[in-house]
Image (cartoon, rainbow, N blue to C red):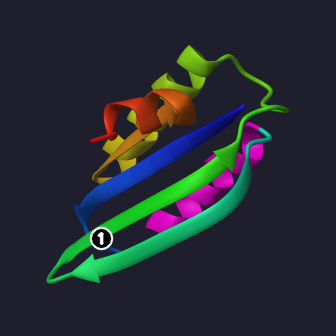
Amino acid sequence: MRGVVTVIGKDKVGIIAGVSQNLAEQNINILDVSQTIMDEYFTMMMSVDLSAMTVDFEAAKAQFHELGKTLGVKISIQNQEIFDAMHKL
């Protein structure tokens, strides 16, 4: 199963490191990543492989919510099939 992780917030040092570390701790592999800084705001989207994750999906969502508070950004994770269905025209 694949997922989509999005990160949005004011840019600061450590965002990519914090998100990547959390993914590694949950055994979630990064397949593709795109990130940019627009003015002072950091945005990142990752395609991830959830097939070997060590926690259930709801626990992963909760961990990202807490990490987002710590880093001062909003982090979301969704099943890629749901993400794709939501963004079809």
Q: Which image quarter holds the C terminus?
A: top left
Q: Nearer the viewer, residue 71 or 31?
A: 31
The residue sitting at 70% across, 57% down in the picture is: 30
**23 within the magenta span:** yes
Quarter of the image where the N terminus is located: top right
Q: Give the SS element for disc 1.
A: strand
- Is the residue 43 above or below the residue 8 in the image? below
In x, y percent, where is residue 77? 48, 36
Is 24 above or below relative to 81? below
Q: Looking at the image, how many numbered discs can be counted on the residues? A: 1
Q: Can you name the residue that lies furthest to the left here?
A: 39
Q: Is residue 25 magenta?
A: yes
Residue 53 left/right relative to 30: right
Q: What range is drawn magenta here? A: 15-26
Q: Which residue does the image show at 24% across and 60% down from the upper left?
A: 9
Where residue 8 sits in the image (x, y, percent)?
Answer: 29, 57
Magenta stretch, main secondary structure, is helix
Q: Which residue is mark 1?
A: 42
Q: Residue at x 55, y 36 (%)?
A: 80
Q: Dot 1: within a 10 Å radius of its alpha carbon, few (fewer than 14), some, or many (20 or more) residues? A: some
Q: In percent of the image, x 41 and y 30: which residue is there?
A: 85
